[in-house]
Image: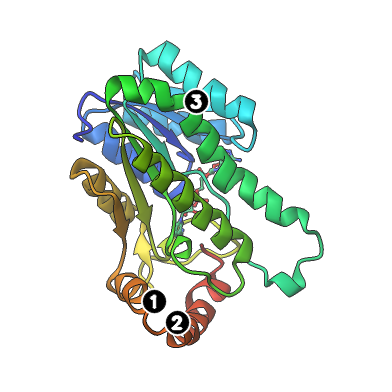
Amino acid sequence: MKLAKKIVLITGASSGIGAELARRAAAAGARLALVARRADRLEKLAAECGPDTLVLAADLSSLEACCAAVDQTVDKLGGLDVLLLNAGISSNLPVAEVSDPALFSTVMQTNYFGPVHCAWRALPHLRRSRGAIVVVSSLQGKAGFPGFAAYSASKHALHGFFDSLRAEQDDVQITIACPGPVATEIGDGRPESSQKGIMSAGRCAEIIVAAVESGKREVVMTAAGKLGVWLRPFLPGLFDRIVRKKTQRFFLKNGSG
Ligand SMILES: NC(=O)c1ccc[n+]([C@@H]2O[C@H](COP(=O)([O-])OP(=O)(O)OC[C@H]3O[C@@H](n4cnc5c(N)ncnc54)[C@H](OP(=O)(O)O)[C@@H]3O)[C@@H](O)[C@H]2O)c1
């Protein structure tokens, strides 16, 4: 699905991959609704994306906020063609070190229920426009990584939900994107895209837009990510050992998800 002239709602547009997706979608000629909690960031980005851009400050961990974001986009922009579900938070703590188990539901609320609630509300509109849903998952949606149980579980859950939704109907194209480590603000650290194995947010957004425009069901990023996903069913023990080593290097040190 080409993005030109499409009405695109992007969640988590105030920074990182979401902001870069907004810039690329605007450059492709889409009309945008930008959603996140930090309104000041969204306003600045909207000024870059064109005068029609709608800014919706919302905390998408609540059902009401998700419904309102979809409803306002449809009311103010006149419909909905693409729902880009990108908002997410990370969690970087081994399970044995979690002192408050509320962490597990907090991560699930934003990373899983947020996208599910937005998609549920948007579905009738997207079926009408024969539109698309784009879900920003992670390599951690394909395999569990040490130190990221809550995060990884929330991303796995997205695959179950959106693969089922895809199987239920043909009207709405569904693309699930699985980036590896990307240089953004997520987590505790700030990895640089110049570091080996860390992708820039711009490159990640470019890959996601290309996947949507070519109608891909799923895009797994980086050669190492593709190799890991292929290897895991055959050699799960070896996969876990490699991931433990890599996670130490990329995630536990940098705090990204
Ligand atoms: N960076 C990586 O290494 C990496 C790897 C794989 C997948 N991902 C995924 O990529 C997506 C984007 O993350 P990013 O790396 O670009 O990090 P980021 O710069 O921290 O962006 C996260 C976005 O989500 C928004 N957000 C978080 N909680 C929200 C809530 N409750 N309601 C509304 N918006 C909320 C944030 O905006 P506000 O704070 O303004 O609300 C922000 O715009 C996430 O789903 C993440 O899991 C990232």
Q: Position of residue 180 (x, y in %)?
A: 40, 65
- The answer to whether 28 appears left or right of 148 in the picture is left
What residue is shown with label 2? 236
Specify which label sits upstream in the sequence, 1 or 3: 3
What residue is shown with label 3? 121
Q: Is residue 224 visible?
A: yes
Q: Residue lying at the far right in this picture: please name it.
A: 99
Callout 3: 10 Å neighbours few (<14), some, many (20+)? some
Label total for image: 3
| Inter-mark Cα distance, 1 to 3 | 35 Å
What residue is shown with label 1? 233
- Look at the numbered disc 1 and give the secondary structure of its residue: loop
Q: Amino acid at mark 2?
A: Pro
- Look at the numbered disc 2 and give the secondary structure of its residue: helix
Confirm or deny contact between disc 1 and disc 2 (CB under 8 A): yes
Tell me the quarter of the image containing the N terminus: top left
Considering only vertical position in the picture, is 157 above or below 172? below
Q: Is residue 40 visible?
A: no
Q: Name the mark nearer the viewer: 1 or 3.
A: 1
Q: Amino acid at mark 3?
A: Arg
Confirm or deny contact between disc 1 and disc 3 (CB under 8 A): no
